[in-house]
Amino acid sequence: MSTKPEAPEKGKDFIRQIIDKDLEKGAYGGRVHTRFPPEPNGYLHIGHAKSICLNFGLARDYDGKCNLRFDDTNPVKEDVEYVDSIREDVRWLGFDWDNNFYASDYFERLYFIAELFIKMGKAYVDHQTADEIRENRGTLKEPGVNSPYRERSVDENLALFRSMRAGELPDGACILRAKIDMAAPNVMMRDPALYRIKHATHHRTGDAWCIYPMYDFTHGLSDAIEGITHSICTLEFENNRPLYDWCVDTLMEGLKRTELFGENAAIYTELAALPGFTDRPRQYEFARLNITGTVLSKRKLIQLVKENHVNGWDDPRMPTISGFRRRGFTPESLRDFCDRIGVAKADSMVEYPLLEACLREDLNKRAPRYMGIMDPVKMVIENYPEDQVDEFEIALNPEDESYGTRNVPFSREVWIERDDFMIDPPKKFFRLGPDREVRLRGAYYVLCTGYETDADGNVTLIRATFDPASRGGWLEGGRKVKGTLHWVSARHALSAEVRNYGPLFTTENPNAVEEGKTFVDYVDPNSLEILADCKVEPAMADLPAGTNLQFERTGYYCADLRDHKPGQALVFNRTTTLRDTWAKIQKQTT
């Protein structure tokens, strides 16, 4: 197998318990073969990350195999862009596939499987309209009505199906349906569609086909063709399982009827020899991921993109894997999150703060520290020589000495955060104010001696003095200060754009909407704050795009994957905030 992340220490979830029992009794010849089968009609989201970690994790844990298969049966909605993004997401999460297949690889075999179903009397061509089929399907309480075309002869159905393939019929003229039971309690089993006509160009097969198999017909058969042993799906596919099984079981029955093979005997003989048609895959469903504060419906995500509520699929506010990557999440943090939430049978809601906790725990260990001023106000240290420059060696990561240090220049004028200064500070405000002394991180003690304001009372300049004896930010045996501020030398500062991303929605559950509204009515227009002229230390000039870092006392950030250009344009996305004790105090007192 390909190299994959090491398995975490964990108990056995119900799927691993099933696999253990299968291995004990020798099922599938001791093989474990899973697959991750996305449709290439959109970008993957955090829910898919859970499925990726599960399917590839099972293969890793049991020394088995995992396929990446694109279930590309709908040419109208699919695109190579989505295929490429899915591959990138899987690899970024730390996994690699043993085989990369497509449902379109099997179009020829699936067509002849459908022909065999017709010969068995298990499928027929129906000329009813979509509305008529829907109306005649029945309800949960009432059986459906048989199609008037249900009893067509085998020869007539074969001729019509071949006409469909030959392109002799327009879109919507007819479909191929399974002949099962129009009174089945599971509505999915009431003669479901197997093939439809679509005169559309496919991203892989071009115009070779004008009929395409339905997803439900294709899915289980593809699993069997690939020799999948454990087909892992989310709970919404539980009702589909009987249809998947019916398709595979019907083919297994048909493969025994060699008198039906005719001129296609080689195809059917090849299928009969595949392990998936002697010991077929079994499907097991687990609960999909639901997470507070966002939507994970692909339809809704597409709507957000197409209606420009966000800036593309990789917008850092999107719950897509590419969005998380661009925001600065690490693959380790997402894998840790998926491991913590576990695999269960019942749906539940996971709090977004758990995801952030996994992220902070990882970034705290790996992110180098820098100083950046988001809302700068200048402080002039009046007793510091105008032409003097000091350099201070400051650790890049106090959690890991191997990161080393960087040299930070210091001069007479420095930038500090505007909200680190108050003209009339309250009792528990331990930052800077008139006649107050604070420590500048790693540099000196400074004492505020005055300030200037504009006509509206906004502070425009702070005046201060420094204590030369406090070099390095400490004064042995001397006075102590409670506040420590980060800063950037004004003479050496680089300008940067900082993008502070917040929750995309104004509600914890945008899927639950008030009457007359849709989920997009809850999109927060203030979910992105752009700070166009932040000041950062010069050591950040050449940081590559994608670099994770911590702006001290501010939060975790990432150099934007698209717009950050080392040495030219510095653009940083806020990944997540730090815990702000002062904000907590303010909240308690208001």
Image (tube, rainbow, N blue to C red):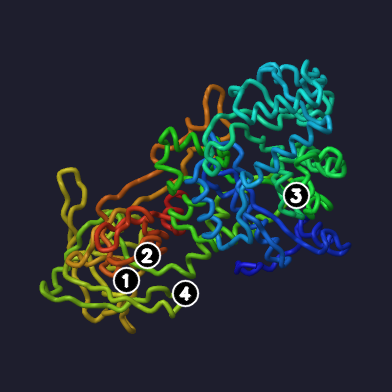
The residue tagged with tag 4: helix, strand or loop?
loop
Which amino acid type corresponds to the residue marked 3 in the rendered image?
Ala
Residue at the location (60% across, 55% down)? 100
Labelled pair 1, 2 in contact (Cβ < 8 Å): yes
Q: Residue lying farthest front?
A: 263
| Relative to 142, 104 lies left or right | left
- Disc 1 versus disc 2: nearer the observer: 2
Position of residue 432 measured from the top left corner of the image (x, y, whole percent): 28, 62
Q: CA distance from mark 3 to mark 2?
A: 54 Å
Residue 514: image location, x then y, percent:
56, 27
Q: Nearer the viewer, mark 1 or mark 4?
A: 4
Left of 512 or right of it: where is 119? right
Q: Residue at x 43, y 80 (%)?
A: 402
Along the line of sight, the residue nearer the viewer: 290 or 418? 290
Q: Are marks 3 and 2 in contact (CB under 8 Å)?
A: no
Mark 1 lies on residue: 441
Q: Which of the labelled discs sits on residue 99, or is there none?
A: none
Label pair 4/3, CB-CB below 8 angstroms = no
Can you identify the residue that label 4 sits on?
Answer: 399
Residue 363: percent from left, percent from top: 48, 65
* Alpha carbon separation for disc pair 1 and 2: 10 Å
Kindly indicate whether the residue at mark 4 contacts the one at mark 1 (C-beta within 8 angstroms): no
Circle 2: residue type: Glu
| Local SS, label 1 | loop
Q: Residues within 10 Å of mark 2 (few under 14, many from 20)?
A: some
What kind of element bears circle 2? loop
